[in-house]
Amino acid sequence: MTQTTTPYNTLEEIQLRRTQLSEAIDQEGDKIGELWHELFKHDENATKGEYIATMINHGIMAIDAFLLVRKLMKNYGRLFDFFGSKRKKRK
């Protein structure tokens, strides 16, 4: 990704560009906020079966995440030993 830079000759040009970038960042932040709230939106019209299926799905995802972290720590835990873990080394 290449970006072309435009030379700024005056302080007003810099301030204008800063304002444009600030507005763009705010708009993107609003979009992210909307998507985040939509992701965790509770469906008021869900039946009991849908509610139970959602709970089971979330439980399975939590177990899967736990097992993934456990597997990664088992295989790559030695990379994190320099953070202060005082394990005895095998002789």
Image (cartoon, rainbow, N blue to C red):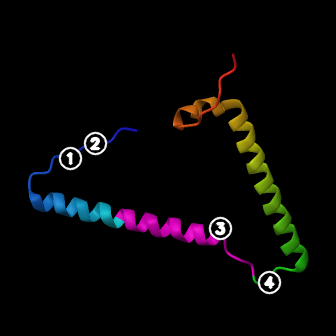
For discs 3 and 2, the disc positioned in front in the rendered view: 3
Classify mark 2: helix, strand or loop. loop
Whether residue 34 appears in magenta in the rendering, the answer is: yes
SS at mark 4 in the image = loop
Write down the region rendered in magenta: 24-43
Relative to 87, residue 44 above or below: below
Q: In this view, does 82 lie above or below 8?
A: above
User: Residue 73 placed where, x, y %?
Assistant: 69, 37
Q: Where does label 2 land, which residue? A: 4
The residue sitting at 81% across, 61% down in the picture is 59
The location of residue 68, given as percent across then percent down, is 74, 43
The answer to which image quadrant residue 27 occupies is: bottom left
Image-quadrant location for residue 56: bottom right
Q: Are marks 2 and 1 in contact (CB under 8 Å)?
A: yes
Q: What element carries label 1?
A: loop
Dot 1: few (<14), some (14–19), or many (≥20) neighbours within 10 Å?
few
Mark 3 belongs to which amino acid?
A: Leu
Q: Is residue 41 left or right of residue 64?
A: left
Q: Mark 1 points at which residue?
A: 6
Q: Which residue: 31% across, 60% down?
A: 21
Q: Name the residue under label 3.
A: 39
Q: Which amino acid does label 1 sit on?
A: Thr
The amino acid type, in three-letter code, at marker 2 is: Thr
Give the numbered dot on residue 45. Answer: 4
